[in-house]
Image: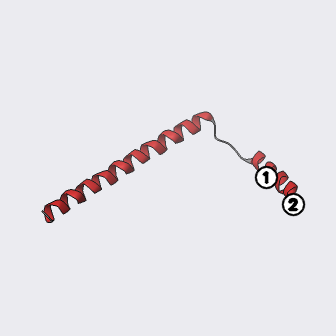
Amino acid sequence: MNPIAYLRDTLSELKQVRWPSRDETAKLTVIVIAISLLVGAYIGALDLTFTKSLSLIFK
């Protein structure tokens, strides 16, 4: 496949993509940030729990 045909096919595919609106992008960004914070807090709590447990065992 030559590069010109590849670029032409790529552009035609990109024209078919349904891009999210500004509102959808903002909502999904907030969801991703919220889930990331929740997962980070959960992992931080697990880390704190395991650290405290191990410090009690090996004290």
Q: Nearer the viewer, residue 58 or 49?
A: 58
Above or below, 58 relative to 48? below
Mark 1 crowd level (few <14, some 14–19, many ≥20, 10 Å Cα)? few
Q: Quadrant of residue 37?
A: top left
Q: Is residue 23 left or right of residue 14?
A: left
Residue at the disc numbered 2: 2
The residue that appears at 58% across and 38% down in the rendered structure is: 24
Q: Position of residue 58 (x, y in %)?
A: 15, 65
Q: Secondary structure at mark 1?
A: helix
The image quadrant that residue 19 belongs to is top right
The residue sitting at the bottom extreme is 58
The front one of 52 and 42 is 52
Colour scheme in use = secondary structure
The residue sitting at 17% across, 60% down in the picture is 55
Percent of width and height locating residue 33: 46, 42
Using the image as rendered, state which of residue 48 and residue 24 is in the foreground: 48
Which secondary structure lies at badge 2? Answer: loop
Which residue is at a point 82% across and 52% down the rendered structure image? 7
- The residue that mark 1 highlights is 10
Q: Amino acid at mark 2?
A: Asn
**Distance between the Cα atoms at labels 2 and 1?**
12 Å
How packed mark 2 is, by other alpha carbons closer than 10 Å (few <14, some 14-19, many 20 or more), is: few
Kind of residue at disc 1:
Thr
Q: Residue at x 63, y 36 (%)?
A: 21
Q: Name the mark nearer the viewer: 2 or 1.
A: 2
The front one of 28 and 43 is 43
Q: Is residue 54 above or below residue 33?
A: below
Left or right: residue 38 compared with residue 50: right
Q: What x and y, as percent, mark residue 39?
A: 38, 51
